[in-house]
Image (spheres, helix red, strand yellow):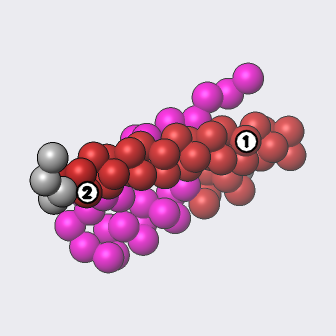
Amino acid sequence: MPEFDFKRFHIRSMNAGSDEERAQINQELKDLYASLSEEEKTIFNEQLQKFLAKEVSRIKSDYESIQGLDQPN
């Protein structure tokens, strides 16, 4: 089963120096998806959903940690 490195695309996009560079990175991801077989697209989508859920959970946890710093004990 192929493993897709969404984190690499995510980090590159976060560090992009311009909207054009970010758009180019997004296009690379779209081109990769377009080149896949139907079975690989299913795997891609499943792995992407897991990656996004993990990232959202991490961001939520980070946000909640930061919010706690504003509140006195």
Which residue reaches farthest top?
1
Magenta span contains residue 19: yes
Residue 2 is drawn in which quadrant? top right
- Secondary structure, mark 1, is helix
Which residue reaches farthest bottom?
19
Can you identify the residue that label 2 sits on?
67
Q: Nearer the viewer, residue 12 or 31?
A: 12
Q: Nearer the viewer, residue 55 or 15?
A: 55
Density class for disc 2 (Cα within 10 Å; few <14, some 14-19, many ≥20) is few
**Whether residue 7 is situated above or below residue 31 in the rendered picture:** above
- Going by the numbered disc 1, the residue's amino acid type is Glu
Residue 1, percent across and down?
Answer: 73, 23
Can you identify the residue that label 1 sits on?
46
Residue sitting at 61 percent across and 29 percent down? 3
Residue 72, percent across and down?
Answer: 13, 53
Of circles 1 and 2, the one toward us is: 2
Numbered-mark total: 2
Q: Nearer the viewer, residue 70 or 5?
A: 70
Q: Which residues are magenta?
A: 1-29
- Going by the numbered disc 2, the residue's amino acid type is Gln
The chief SS type of the magenta part is: helix
Residue 68, percent across and down?
Answer: 24, 51
Residue 48, percent across and down?
Answer: 62, 46
Residue sitting at 32 percent across and 68 percent down? 21
Q: Earlier in the sequence, mark 1 or mark 2?
A: 1
